[in-house]
């Protein structure tokens, strides 16, 4: 899928989709009681994106807000944890990390049917293509360096100082993640099975590298989950914290690094692009910059980390396929993601065997 196609499919907001509506008057009442300086009248639109948690634009005469909610319908245990998103956004904002300001959380399903939270609407630029089209090579290089610096900044945050010491279980991150995503894959029988996914679910736990670390990790750090300054190589807000937890920083960084290994029609990938002409650093240089910022000598076992992240990404898409089968997928574009699932699983297995 081209960047133009992705922008047309996922960018912007519009009418609320079937099955995702709610009582706007009841929401207005709650906002008046819980969000400082909120003043209606309220107009609600739904963002085209939001594959997991439906996301809405709340428009008032003075300003706009963003609301993230759990989707309606049957949910897998542990999925769609918007309460965790709200908590980490508030904590990281207080620590000086670029996130949208979080205003209030509602866990009372009687208000709009599911739990939700409200945050600031950050105005800026979103790149739907990881090659950051529209920039000249020198500026593109600066934008890539800003992404590198931002993920390094995240991993340098002390979870204890940020009041996130219990945000996840420290230690054994890869073992726990493999168990989690293998389990969600296995439980979602309606989404079907893939031989490559079954193979990876057995191979990965037997090849976890030695050593362990713990940091706040985003879980889906890529260019289209960031809002950029309109003209500067500066990230104003990192979005979509649903998969965040305490985990191994190398797992998080190498998820981001998948952009070098996935083809352009898989979200976030630019394998095969002319990096030199574009001004994009080589993978080796990008890894070296992160290592320098985080005090590392290098990254061993890179193939394991990449295979793990591709498996995890495929498991997430497998879950989207399951929700699509059950009729609860948050976006009508879910099918475009599901089509790449077999290819992504095959790439992950090939990476493991390199």
Image (cartoon, helix red, strand yellow):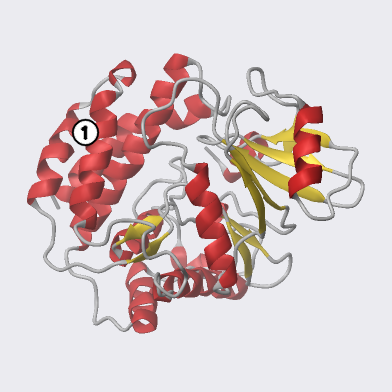
User: Can residue 130 be seen by looking at this rendering?
Assistant: no
User: Residue 132 is drawn in which quadrant?
Assistant: bottom right
Q: Name the residue that disc number 1 marks.
A: 197
* Above or below 76: residue 6: below
Q: Nearer the viewer, residue 192 or 122?
A: 122
Q: Nearer the viewer, residue 212 or 340?
A: 212
* Above or below 241: residue 165: below
* Above or below 67: residue 329: above
User: Which residue lies at the image location 63% right of the left edge and 71% below the top edge?
Assistant: 234
Residue 241, percent from left and from top = 50, 52
Residue 237, percent from left and from top = 62, 62
Which class describes the residues within 10 Å of circle 1: few (<14), some (14-19), or many (20+)?
A: many
Answer with left or right where residue 82 lies relative to residue 40.
left
User: Can residue 317 be seen by looking at this rendering?
Assistant: yes
Query: Which residue appears farthest toward the left when viewing the image?
Result: 206
Residue 322, percent from left and from top = 39, 22
User: Which residue lies at the image location 62% right of the left edge and 73% below the top edge?
Assistant: 139
User: Residue 300 is drawn in which quadrant?
Assistant: bottom left
């Amino acid at each position: 899928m081209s960047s133009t196609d992705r922008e047309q499919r996922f960018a912007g907001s519009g009418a609320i989709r079937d099955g995702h509506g709610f009582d706007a008057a009841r929401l207005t009442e709650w906002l008046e009681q819980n969000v400082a300086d909120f003043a209606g009248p309220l107009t609600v639109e739904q963002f085209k994106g939001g594959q997991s948690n439906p996301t809405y634009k709340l428009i008032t005469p003075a300003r706009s807000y963003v609301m993230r909610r759990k989707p309606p319908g049957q949910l897998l245990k542990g999925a769609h944890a918007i309460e965790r998103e709200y908590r980490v956004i508030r904590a990281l904002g207080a620590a000086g990390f670029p996130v949208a300001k979080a205003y209030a959380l509602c866990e009372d399903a009687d208000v709009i049917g599911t739990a939700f939270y409200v945050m600031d609407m950050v105005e800026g630029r979103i790149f739907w293509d990881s090659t950051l089209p529209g920039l000249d090579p020198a500026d593109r290089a600066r934008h890539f360096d800003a992404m590198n610096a931002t993920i390094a900044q995240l991993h340098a945050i002390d979870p204890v100082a940020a009041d996130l010491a219990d945000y996840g279980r420290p230690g054994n991150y890869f073992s726990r993640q493999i168990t989690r995503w293998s389990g969600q894959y296995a439980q979602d029988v309606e989404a079907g099975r893939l031989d490559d996914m079954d193979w990876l679910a057995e191979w990965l736990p037997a090849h976890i590298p030695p050593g362990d670390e713990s940091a706040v990790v985003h879980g889906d750090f890529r260019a289209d989950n960031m809002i950029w300054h309109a003209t500067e190589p500066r990230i104003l807000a990192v979005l979509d914290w649903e998969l965040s937890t305490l985990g191994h920083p190398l797992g998080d960084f190498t998820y981001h690094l998948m952009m070098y290994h996935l083809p352009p029609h898989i979200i976030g990938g630019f394998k095969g692009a002319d990096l030199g002409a574009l001004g994009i650093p080589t993978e080796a240089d990008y890894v070296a910059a992160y290592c320098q910022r985080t005090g590392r000598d290098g990254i061993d076992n890179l193939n394991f980390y990449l295979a793990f992240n591709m498996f995890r990404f495929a498991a997430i898409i497998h879950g989207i396929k399951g929700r699509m089968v059950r009729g609860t997928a948050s976006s009508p574009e879910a099918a475009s993601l599901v089509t790449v699932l077999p290819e992504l699983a095959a790439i992950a297995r090939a990476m493991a065997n390199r």
